[in-house]
């Protein structure tokens, strides 16, 4: 059982508190930037142990959060995102172990060259500084963000959603325990100790230069607010309107397996497929089996005229359906004219997050992978692989769909910038 929810909710001096948190995080960031890899890995090893050892406490805190949210009539997909299980806590701890095992990005020389005057120039990875992470419902983000920032030498200020407040506090206790055991500053991973929504606005202001980057993880309204109000750089994706295109050359059994997994494995994650596109040239063989499979698996299908004709249970799709991130057991489906038609639809309605093609035709696959302008594009694989852990990053702080600095899963390496080191032998400029 976690402590009563007193914290500082309603504290009139919230701006002072948040500024103080940022000041301590900045000091911790300076120390982390110079910490040797061995010390950071020691902390990560201790965090992994603490997560496993405190699983019962974390689950108890999470059960209180889930009970509170369930009483409000939240959707099953929302509750799934909030819920922790022993398996999910083990996966969280396994992710920490994977992060510990990846090379430390800080200090890596990515390029080196010598100028004609004899000077040597190196480009070297350095931490970003203090990262503010604002997230909703998914308490595992606290662990993922905390350990990735630690590995990359950054301090982090975590502001979880009010619905996951107890869960995040229990997880944060394990993170701090690991920092303490390794002799690193506890302020390196700070959790905002209030549900007060004003804390979000203060973080977006940058806290007087205390925060270098903001990372939002949540629904469309949160991310839109962050991108509109933030006074510091943002790593963000607005939503995951993801597509699976089934080409006429697709192996039907493979297509069924991929489509079912992409939509129904976990409907509430940002990598879930929201639209199914089927090649008109292969629709006679592929469309009906795919639609029947989805409906019989408990998925509502909203389709165009061609899709409605193959199954009376299909509901008519509205114009809005092609642009909707359902995060639920609902999918929009339509027939398109080949890979070109699929690319055009994705260009007009996608969110540049994750899109997949199922095809045996190598040329069709190559065209799709080349021309679909999304952070992640896949051939013959489920969109649910849009995950930093599946990319070998151990965890992710989010999927960035912008084109500046980071794109796709944001892992430890993506949480670094670079500086130039120049070595001379007394050169002066004429």
Image (cartoon, rainbow, N blue to C red):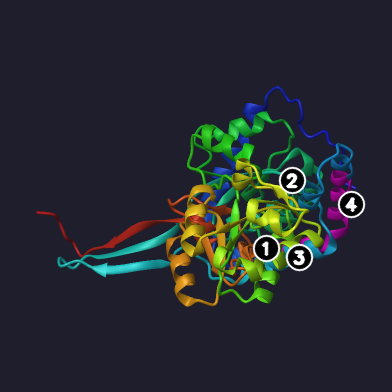
Give the quarter of the figure containing the C terminus.
bottom left
The residue at the far left in this view is 430
Residue interval drawn in magenta: 43-66
- Badge 4, how many Cα within 10 Å: few under 14, some, many 20+? some
- Residue under numbered circle 3: 293
Q: Mark yes or no: residue 207 visible.
A: no
Q: Earlier in the sequence, mark 1 or mark 4?
A: 4
Q: Is residue 88 visible?
A: yes
Marks 2 and 4 sit apart, C-alpha to C-alpha, by: 16 Å
| Residue behind mark 1 | 262
Check disc 1 and report its element: helix, strand or loop: helix
Tell me the distance, in whole angstroms, between the alpha carbons under discs 2 and 3: 30 Å
Where is residue 340 drawn, in percent x and y?
46, 61
Discs 2/3, front: 3
Which residue is disc 2 drawn over?
137
- From this view, report whether residue 69 is shown above or below residue 427: above
Real-space Cα distance between discs 1 and 4? 31 Å
Q: Which of marks 4 and 3 is in front?
A: 3
In the current view of this chain or complex, which residue is farthest to the top? Answer: 12
Residue beneath disc 4: 60
Residue drawn at x 59%, y 72% is 380
Query: Circle 1: is it few (<14), some (14-19), or many (20+) Cα within 10 Å?
Result: many
Q: What element carries label 3?
A: helix
- CA gap between label 4 and label 3 equals 37 Å
Q: Is 151 left or right of 298, judged from the image as shown?
A: left
For the residues carrying marks 2 and 4, which lies nearer the camera in this image? Answer: 2
The Cα–Cα distance between marks 1 and 2, rounded to whole angstroms, is: 21 Å
């Amino acid at each position: 059982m976690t402590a009563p929810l007193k914290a500082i909710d309603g504290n009139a001096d919230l701006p002072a508190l948040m500024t103080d948190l940022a000041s301590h995080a900045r000091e911790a960031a300076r120390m982390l930037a110079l910490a040797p890899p061995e010390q950071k890995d020691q902390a990560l090893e201790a965090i992994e142990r603490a997560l496993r050892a405190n699983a019962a406490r974390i689950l108890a805190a999470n059960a209180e959060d889930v009970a509170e949210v369930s009483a409000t009539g939240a959707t099953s997909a929302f509750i799934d995102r909030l819920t922790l299980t022993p398996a999910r806590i083990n996966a969280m701890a396994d992710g920490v172990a994977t992060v510990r095992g990846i090379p430390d990005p800080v200090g890596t020389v990515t390029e080196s060259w010598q100028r004609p005057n004899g000077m040597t120039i190196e480009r070297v990875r350095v931490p970003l500084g203090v990262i503010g992470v604002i997230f909703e419902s998914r308490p595992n983000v606290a662990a993922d963000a905390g350990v990735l920032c630690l590995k990359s030498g950054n301090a982090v200020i975590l502001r979880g959603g009010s619905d996951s407040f107890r869960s995040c506090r229990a997880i944060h206790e394990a993170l701090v325990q690991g920092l303490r055991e390794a002799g690193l500053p506890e302020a390196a991973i700070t959790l905002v100790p209030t549900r007060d929504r004003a804390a979000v606005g203060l973080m977006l202001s940058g806290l007087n230069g205390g925060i270098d980057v903001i990372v939002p993880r949540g629904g469309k309204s949160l991310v839109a607010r962050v991108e509109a109000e933030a006074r510091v750089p943002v790593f963000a994706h607005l939503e995951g309107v993801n597509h699976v295109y089934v080409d006429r050359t697709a192996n039907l059994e493979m297509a069924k397996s991929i489509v079912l997994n992409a939509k129904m494995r976990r409907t509430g994650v940002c990598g879930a497929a929201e639209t199914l596109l089927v090649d008109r040239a292969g629709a006679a063989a592929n469309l009906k089996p795919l639609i029947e499979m989805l409906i019989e698996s408990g998925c509502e299908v909203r389709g165009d005229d061609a899709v409605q004709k193959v199954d009376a249970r299909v509901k008519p799709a509205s114009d809005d359906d092609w642009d909707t991130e359902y995060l639920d057991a609902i999918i929009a489906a339509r027939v398109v004219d080949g890979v070109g038609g699929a690319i055009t639809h994705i260009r007009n309605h996608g969110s540049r997050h994750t899109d997949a093609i199922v095809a045996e035709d190598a040329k069709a696959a190559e065209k799709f992978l080349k021309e679909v302008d999304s952070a992640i594009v896949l051939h013959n694989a489920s969109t649910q692989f849009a995950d930093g852990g599946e990319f070998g990053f151990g965890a992710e702080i989010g999927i960035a769909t912008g084109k500046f600095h980071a794109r796709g899963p944001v892992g430890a390496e993506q949480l670094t910038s670079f500086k130039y080191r120049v070595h001379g032998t007394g050169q002066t400029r004429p």
